[in-house]
Amino acid sequence: MTRIHSAGTLAEATLVQRSLEDAGIHTEMRGMSRPGLAGEIPIPDAKVDVWVGEDDADAARAVLSGLEARAHLEWVCPRCGEHNPASFEVCWQCKQDVADDS
């Protein structure tokens, strides 16, 4: 097994794990209770680790690169011109649905 990602929160680790699993890569999470111990144990040790099989490591890195790239994408609302993060399905300003061109 290869550690592919260390997350500061369980939510972040779960996002990574689910993205990898959706790509057909078997994962294992370790240290799921560690973030709650931050301060009691050193902060660098209070991370949740996502592990994959060594044969899947390169594919997993590619999936993670795609996640990181999407995190910086945005779309411009066709109605009001507001910039929205790619993760938003509705414009935060005018409530226009991203899929609705009208």
Image (cartoon, helix red, strand yellow):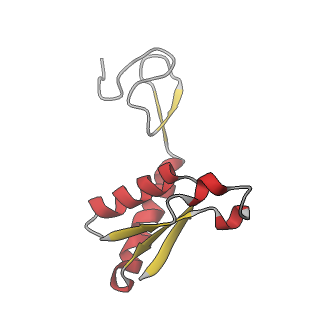
Q: Is residue 101 above or below residue 25?
A: above
Q: Is residue 58 above or below residue 25?
A: below
Residue at image location 53% in from the left, 58% down from the top: 33
Q: Position of residue 41 (x, y in %)?
A: 71, 63
Residue extending farthest top: 94
Residue extending farthest front: 40
Q: Is residue 34 above or below residue 93?
A: below
Q: Position of residue 75 (x, y in %)?
A: 46, 35
Residue at image location 29% in from the left, 23% down from the top: 100
Q: Position of residue 40 (x, y in %)?
A: 72, 58
> Is 47 left, or right, of 24 in this rendering?
right
The image quarter in which residue 91 lies = top left
Which image quadrant: the C terminus?
A: top left
Q: Position of residue 45 (x, y in %)?
A: 66, 67
Count of numbered circles on the image: 0
> Is 84 left, or right, of 37 in this rendering?
left
The image quarter in which residue 43 lies = bottom right
Report the front residue among 82 and 56. Answer: 56
Which image quadrant: the N terminus?
A: bottom left
Report the front residue among 15 and 87. Answer: 15
